[in-house]
């Protein structure tokens, strides 16, 4: 019998991600001998070794690599199903939206206002998260819908529709040597200090960690950092900061994303409202799906 239990899968994933039984046991808040016994029992039932153990290190076998990859998705799906069931059974239903602070392209106020006009629309709870966890919040059911920026954020396995494509600009203090340029290339910015965002994947930036756009604007004005941002994000900054197009920077695509296993009707209504608001903002009448046929969206 090789059927997996969710607890066993959770135990294995903790060890596979930590590659250390002690840290995994502490993370799970169980005794290390009990964790070791559970993993050996799982290996015995599956009939394959999942981990290579030595006195100094723990590593994954090929079978363990497969279970880590597919098991995380499976556990997220189970957790999402439980959360969606709880959400559906609540009288005070909410739509949980996750977004990066200042990362809505200026669309969110109009989207929320339009969504409130939908018949029986639930209240919207806005959650904030870093790039490393916003998509994860969708996958495991802690959020119902998200505004994400591709290609920086991975939408693999999620449904998504494009809202806007934003060229990137360098934000500089007005006295910076590059501030007078009509345009820049990425190479022109080599050696410049750039900020780090909490929760974002490491990208080589060595500048100060910033929590929000207000803090970033102040640090740029003080000459402590520069920033390369989507043009819509940089637009509200004050006149003491200069925005110079970076011609060869990869554009930022703002998408509304959701899980296909999420609560159906009000997620569908939110996606429809968001794409409609974005289309009106662009003066267009059609918003294509991102990597999906039109019929794949609600």
Image: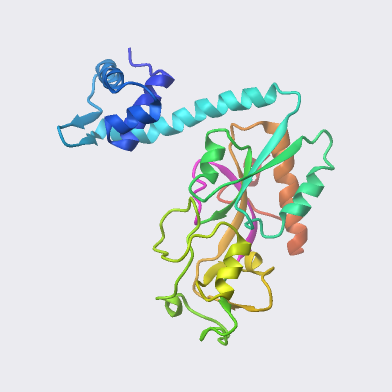
- What residue span does the magenta drawing correspond to? 152-166
Quick one: which residue is furthest to the front in this view?
A: 222
Say left or right for 196 vs 235. left
Which is more toward the observer, 207 or 95? 207
Residue depicted at 51% across the width and 52% down the height: 153
User: Is residue 159 on the magenta stretch?
Assistant: yes
Residue depicted at 51% across the width and 80% down the height: 184
**Residue 167 seen anywhere in this rendered image of the structure:** no
Q: Position of residue 250 (x, y in %)?
A: 50, 66
Residue 85 location, quadrant: top right
**Residue 237 seen anywhere in this rendered image of the structure:** yes
Q: Position of residue 162 (x, y in %)?
A: 63, 54
Residue depicted at 53% across the width and 55% down the height: 150
Say left or right for 15 vs 158. left
Which is more toward the observer, 252 or 244? 244
Q: Is residue 83 above or below residue 172?
A: above
Quick one: which residue is furthest to the left in this view?
A: 55
Q: How many marks?
A: 0
Q: Is residue 38 above or below residue 97?
A: above
Colouring mode (rainbow / by chain / secondary structure / one colour): rainbow
Q: From the image, which quarter does the N terminus lie in?
A: top left
User: Is residue 220 on the magenta stretch?
Assistant: no
Q: From the image, which quarter does the C terminus lie in?
A: top right
Q: Position of residue 171 (x, y in %)?
A: 57, 74
Which is more toward the observer, 260 or 11? 11
Q: Position of residue 137 (x, y in %)?
A: 55, 39
């Amino acid at each position: 019998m090789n059927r997996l239990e969710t607890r066993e899968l959770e135990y294995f994933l903790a060890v596979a991600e930590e590659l250390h039984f002690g840290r995994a046991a502490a993370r799970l808040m169980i005794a290390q001998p009990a964790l070791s016994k559970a993993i050996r029992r799982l290996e015995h039932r599956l009939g394959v070794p999942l981990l290579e153990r030595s006195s100094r290190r723990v590593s994954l076998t090929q079978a363990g690599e497969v279970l880590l990859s597919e098991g995380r998705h499976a556990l997220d799906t189970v957790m999402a199903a439980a959360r969606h069931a709880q959400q559906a059974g609540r009288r005070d239903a909410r739509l949980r939206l996750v977004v990066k602070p200042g990362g809505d392209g200026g669309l969110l106020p109009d989207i929320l206002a339009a969504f409130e006009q939908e018949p029986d629309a639930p209240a919207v709870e806005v959650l904030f998260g870093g790039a490393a966890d916003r998509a994860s919040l969708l996958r495991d059911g802690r959020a119902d819908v998200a505004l994400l920026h591709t290609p920086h954020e991975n939408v693999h396995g999620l449904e998504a529709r494009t809202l806007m494509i934003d060229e990137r600009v360098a934000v500089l203090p007005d006295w910076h040597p590059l501030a007078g340029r009509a345009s820049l290339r990425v190479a022109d910015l080599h050696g410049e200090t750039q900020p780090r965002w909490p929760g974002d994947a490491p990208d080589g930036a060595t500048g100060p960690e910033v929590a929000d756009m207000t803090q970033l604007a102040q640090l740029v004005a003080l000459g402590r950092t520069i920033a390369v941002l989507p043009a819509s994000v940089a637009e509200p900054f004050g006149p003491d900061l200069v925005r110079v197009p970076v011609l060869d920077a990869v554009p930022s695509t703002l998408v509304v994303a959701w899980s296909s296993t999420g609560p159906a009707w009000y997620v569908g209504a939110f996606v429809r409202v968001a794409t409609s608001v974005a289309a009106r903002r662009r003066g267009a009448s059609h918003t294509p799906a991102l990597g999906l046929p039109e019929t794949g969206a609600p």
